[in-house]
Amino acid sequence: MKGLAINKQQKWLRFLLPFPVGVVVYVLILLVFDTLNQFSSNFFSQEVAVTIVLAFILMEALRTLLNAIDKRFPLVSELPFDNEEAHGVSGITHSLRIVLIPLVSLLISVMIITPLVSIYFYSVLIISDFNTELVVFNGVYGIVAILYGIIHVSTSFLAVHKQIHYRQEKELRRGMESDLEKFKMQINPQLLYEGLENLISIVHAQPRMAEQFINQLSKIYRYNLDHRHVELVELKKELELSKTLLYLLNVKHNNAIMLELNLTEESLHRQVIPCTISVLIQELVNRTIINEFQPLHICLEIKDGELYLVSRHNPKIGLNGSAEWNLSLINNAHAFLNDNKQLKVVQNQQYLHINIPLFEIEEE
């Protein structure tokens, strides 16, 4: 429907534009012959109608010809993908087009105006000596044709630029969507490997616990599958997944990992990217020394409307206590929804703080 409305606007513009153009041409011709004082008395005269008709015929001819040139020699052979450049078509380069189109427009103007003006003077005005008038008509309409060609070239370049920009934005969005999918699925491989190792160690000694372990592990993968095409979920659902993850991790760490929630009821209904908290908890567990003498206490709390993950800073020796968290993938996933919302890790000798962006869905 929108494209149909644009076509109707262009159609009306094609019929309306020759009127002001014809009047301007008539005024310019009067100025050349120094007879502008005749304009008020001859405003609705035959000469004005002729200039309007000539303007309409010329502009329609130029529009048809220039559109045909654009189809035969398009600005680009194909729209670029991502960071690729547009491939020009051999035959008419961009620089040559800027010069060639106005010249072609001028040539078409002379070819159309000359016979039409000649017919008008011979048949209507019955005048045989009109060389001066013919030169003036060709000069004024030539200027109109050149301006028309320049405007056509400008709008063509602008339209192609918009198409290229749109394609690049589309490819960028596709890349962000890919980062989002990678982030939501990155918890799977390592968790599966560790989960199977733990399952092997308990399957014979504690069959009932092994059955429950399998159920909890399946919940995580079911959650990932159910939310693989979902951009945001409620924080409440994400916390349920985190508790399931902690159950699996505590099998290996002998219940030395604890999760404390200091959240408001309102915050539970705010939105978060699926698996954000789970990925951070798993990364934190992998980076921290955990045993019965040094348990890991994780606290999720709300401060100034932001969600924070807080724990004691007890990094493994291999990290030297200064290794940076690699948040590029998770931040790219958040950039897909909002560039301003990024994760930040602040750590000192005692505590580790990670802010987790929350989103609110506005109801229309």
Image (cartoon, rainbow, N blue to C red):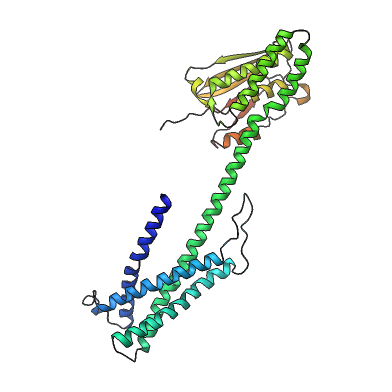
Quarter of the rendering containing residue 292: top right
| Picture coordinates of residue 317, whole percent (x, y) | 78, 22
- 105 and 225: which one is in front? 225
**From the viewer's perspective, is residue 231 above or below residue 38?**
above
Quarter of the rendering containing residue 147: bottom left
| Picture coordinates of residue 161, whole percent (x, y) | 53, 56
| Picture coordinates of residue 198, whole percent (x, y) | 75, 16
Q: Can residue 302 be seen here?
A: yes
* Quadrant of the snapshot with the C terminus: top left
The residue shown at (43%, 52%) is 3
Residue ranking furthest to the left: 41
| Picture coordinates of residue 219, whole percent (x, y) | 63, 19
The residue shown at (64%, 53%) is 84
Q: Can residue 287 be seen here?
A: no
The residue shown at (39%, 60%) is 10
> How many labels sit on residues?
0
Residue 51 is left or right of residue 215, and the answer is left
Residue 315 is left or right of residue 162, and the answer is right
